[in-house]
C-alpha cells in the first residue's frame, strides 16, 4: 500500500513542490552565508583602517558598514519553514484520503471474492447432493440385481461395496484453491475392498454341456 501511495500523482506533485522549496532554501542559505562573510570582511577592514588612523594620529573619516540584514534573513527562513509545514499537512491529508480509498477498494474486492467462493461452495454442495443421490440409486439397483442373481443358480452372489462418504472439506478446499476436483479421492469405508461400484467376486458359471453324440445317423 505504501508504494501505491508514494507513486500516486498527487503525492508525487507534493514531493516535487517540497523539493523545490528545499532547493530554494539551500540556495538562499548559501547566498546568506556569502553575504555574512562579505559583511564580516568589510567590518574587519573598517576596524583595521580606523585603528591605523588612530595610531598615526590622523582623523579617520571612514563610514562603518551597515549592519548585516539578519532580520530579513530570518524572516525569509521562517517563510520556508511555513511553506514546508503547509506541504506536510497537505501530504498528510492526501495520504489519508488515498489510504481510505485503497481500503475501500480492497474491501470491495474481498467481498466479491467471498461472494464468488460462497457461490462456488453452494454449487458444489448441490453437485455433491446429486452425486450422493446417484450413489444411493446405483447402490439400490445393484442390491436388487444381486437379490435377483442370488435366485438364479447359474449366477453367483456379487459383493457390493457400500456407498462411500464424500470428502466435502477436501472438495471445498480444492474449489477455493483452484485444484482439480477429480483429484480429491472419496473416503473409503473401513474394512472394505474393491473398486468404485464394481464387483469383487467372480460370478459362478455353469459347466459346459457334453459333446453331441451321433446315434443312428441322428445327432443328439
Image (spheres, rainbow, N blue to C red):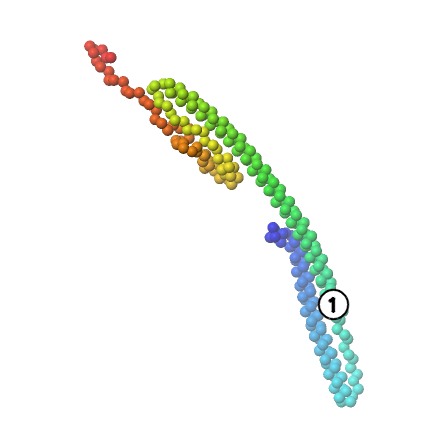
* Pick the front one: 127 or 83: 127
- Say whether residue 205 is left or right of residue 123: left
* Pick the front one: 78 or 208: 208
Q: Residue lying furthest left in this view?
A: 216
Q: Quadrant of residue 162?
A: top left
Q: Residue lying furthest top in this view?
A: 216
At 24% from the left and 12% from the top, the residue drawn is 220
At 37% from the left and 23% from the top, the residue drawn is 157
Tag 1 secondary structure: helix
At 45% from the left and 29% from the top, the residue drawn is 163
- Say whether residue 120 is left or right of residue 154: right
Q: Position of residue 2 (x, y in %)?
A: 61, 52
Report which residue position mark 1 lands on. 74
Q: Is residue 188 above or below residue 212?
A: below
Q: Is residue 15 above or below residue 105?
A: below
Q: Quadrant of residue 62?
A: bottom right
Q: Residue lying furthest front in this view?
A: 191
Q: Is residue 93 above or below residue 118?
A: below
* Pick the front one: 3 or 61: 3
Say few, some or many: other residues with alpha carbon within 10 Å of mark 1 (under 14 / 14 to 19 / 20 or more).
few
- Say whether residue 161 is left or right of residue 204: right
Q: Is residue 141 above or below residue 13?
A: above
Q: Residue lying furthest bottom in this view?
A: 56
Figure disc tally? 1
Q: Position of residue 212 (x, y in %)?
A: 24, 15
At 75% from the left and 70% from the top, the residue drawn is 70
Q: Position of residue 57 (x, y in %)?
A: 78, 89
Q: Position of residue 36 (x, y in %)?
A: 71, 73
Amino acid at each position: 500500500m505504501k508504494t501505491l501511495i508514494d507513486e500516486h500523482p498527487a503525492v508525487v506533485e507534493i514531493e516535487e513542490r517540497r523539493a523545490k522549496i528545499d532547493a530554494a532554501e539551500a540556495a538562499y542559505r548559501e547566498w546568506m552565508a556569502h553575504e555574512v562573510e562579505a559583511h564580516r570582511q568589510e567590518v574587519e577592514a573598517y576596524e583595521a583602517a580606523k585603528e591605523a588612523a588612530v595610531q598615526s594620529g590622523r582623523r579617520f573619516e571612514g563610514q562603518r558598514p551597515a549592519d548585516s540584514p539578519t532580520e530579513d534573513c530570518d524572516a525569509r527562513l521562517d517563510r520556508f519553514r511555513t511553506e514546508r509545514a503547509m506541504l506536510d499537512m497537505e501530504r498528510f491529508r492526501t495520504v489519508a484520503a488515498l489510504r481510505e480509498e485503497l481500503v475501500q477498494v480492497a474491501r470491495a474486492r474481498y467481498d466479491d471474492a467471498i461472494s464468488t467462493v460462497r457461490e462456488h461452495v453452494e454449487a458444489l454442495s448441490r453437485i455433491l447432493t446429486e452425486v450422493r443421490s446417484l450413489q444411493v440409486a446405483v447402490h439400490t439397483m445393484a442390491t436388487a440385481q444381486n437379490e435377483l442373481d442370488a435366485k438364479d443358480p447359474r449366477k453367483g452372489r456379487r459383493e457390493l461395496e457400500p456407498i462411500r462418504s464424500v470428502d466435502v472439506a477436501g472438495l471445498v478446499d480444492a474449489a477455493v484453491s483452484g485444484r482439480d476436483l477429480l483429484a480429491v479421492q472419496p473416503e473409503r469405508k473401513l474394512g472394505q475392498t474393491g473398486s468404485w461400484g464394481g464387483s469383487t467376486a467372480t460370478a459362478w458359471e455353469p459347466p459346459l454341456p457334453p459333446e453331441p453324440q451321433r446315434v443312428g445317423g441322428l445327432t443328439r
